[in-house]
Amino acid sequence: MTLAHAQSLDHFGFVHLHGFVPAEVLAELRSRVDELFAQEGAAAGSEFKMEPGSRRLANCAAKAAVFRRCVVHPSILELVGRVLGPRFKLSSINVRSANPHNGVTQPLHADMGAIADEQGFWVCNTVWLLDDFTTENGALRAVPGSHRWNKLPQDVLADPATKHPDEVLITGAAGDVVVMNAHLWHGGTDNRTDRERRALHGFYCRHDKPQQQYQKKLLGAETIAALTPEERRLLAIDDPSNDELSSADVPRSGFLK
């Protein structure tokens, strides 16, 4: 983590890592995502929530080692630790693909409807660009600095789906990664092209908060047996406090019902 990375995360609420993913890893990610969409069909994403205008994959930690390798990358974890402090865990690994000509703009939201508490920030997201993010194909929009406002957009905006006067569009090339303080007001824009726009989301939370998707319950015995020690730690497989937190019925999305 460079000083510029730290300053960008602190001040703007996100940092853009250009060309982070090696070409062979990007190819493996894309191939596996396409395979899973073909296999799961209309049920894709059903372990969590479906979203109009997009296709989703959920529970990706159980579906390929390449997804798990991404979310335990030491450089990524260092940046996540800048937001969450030294003790955090993986909350979920999902894929979101914005459908061609979907006509859908996500409302500005904070992930899990999270507001920083007395201990500070508690959610952080990473967006792995599997396709180029352009001004036309559903790139991410964000309101710089909004992670420090301690407010949710739905509580102060008449319509969180409309363009915010201070928002910026985060475009980039396939293989880039955006690490984002997930209290930042953000959302996907509409895809106005004839091609899908895919991204992998590695989402993390502070150790004392519930996982978005209860990993231990979802993974299955065979996958758990294959985990590395670092993966077990990050997925909170052996953490009784996480079992209690994450098995409870709590809000899991900032905007999906």
Image (cartoon, grey):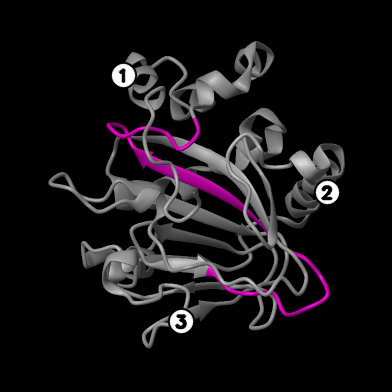
Q: Position of residue 251 (x, y in %)?
A: 38, 41
Give how far apart the Cα atoms at labels 1 and 3 are: 38 Å
Among the two numbered marks 2 and 3 on one chain, the one whose residue lies closer to the N terminus: 2
Give the amino acid type for the residue marked by disc 1 in the picture: Ser
Give how far apart the Cα atoms at labels 2 and 3 are: 29 Å
Give the amino acid type for the residue marked by disc 3 in the picture: Val
Find residue 193 and report its image quarter: bottom right
| Magenta highlight range | 188-213
Give the amino acid type for the residue marked by disc 2 in the picture: Asp
Q: Position of residue 47 (x, y in %)?
A: 62, 34
Q: Which residue is mark 1?
A: 241
Among the two numbered marks 1 and 3 on one chain, the one whose residue lies closer to the N terminus: 3
What residue is rendered at 72% in x and 33% in y? 64
The stretch drawn in magenta includes residue 198: yes
Q: Which residue is mark 2?
A: 34
Q: Which residue is mark 3?
A: 168
